Amino acid sequence: MENDLKQRRATHDLSQAGLGEAVGVSRQTINAIERGRYDPSLELAFELAAHFDCRIEDIFTPE
């Protein structure tokens, strides 16, 4: 699944660790999602969308 998490994080001046802390996961998890190596759970996808005040579909798109 493709995503624009890295760009959103940069726009909000957040590190991977900072975003991970905000949504309750590790920096490594954020890194894996950004690289497309890990698809987040639905719960985590909702947390990320809520953090950026957008819809899940705005962050994640099917390949």
Image: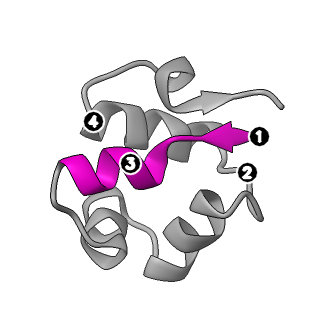
**Residue 38: x, y in percent?**
74, 61
Q: CA distance from mark 3 to mark 1?
A: 16 Å
Relative horizontal placement of residue 31, taking residue 38 as reference (left or right): left
Question: In the image as oriented, which residue stretches furthest toward the left?
Answer: 13
Report crowding for label 4: few under 14, some 14 to 19, many 20 or more residues within 10 A (C-alpha).
some
Residue 52: give its label.
4
Which residue bears the numbered disc 3?
Answer: 7
Q: How is the image coloured?
A: one colour
Secondary structure of the residue carrying numbered label 3: helix
Residue 20, image quadrant: bottom left
Residue 32, image quadrant: bottom right
Relative horizontal placement of residue 8, taking residue 35 as reference (left or right): left
Judging depth in this view, the residue of 42 and 4 nearest the camera is: 4
Secondary structure of the residue carrying numbered label 4: loop
Which residue bears the numbered disc 1?
Answer: 1
**Residue 10: x, y in percent?**
27, 56
Which residue bears the numbered disc 2?
Answer: 39
Q: Amino acid at mark 2?
A: Asp
Q: Which residues are magenta?
A: 1-11
Q: Which corner quadrant holds the N terminus? A: top right
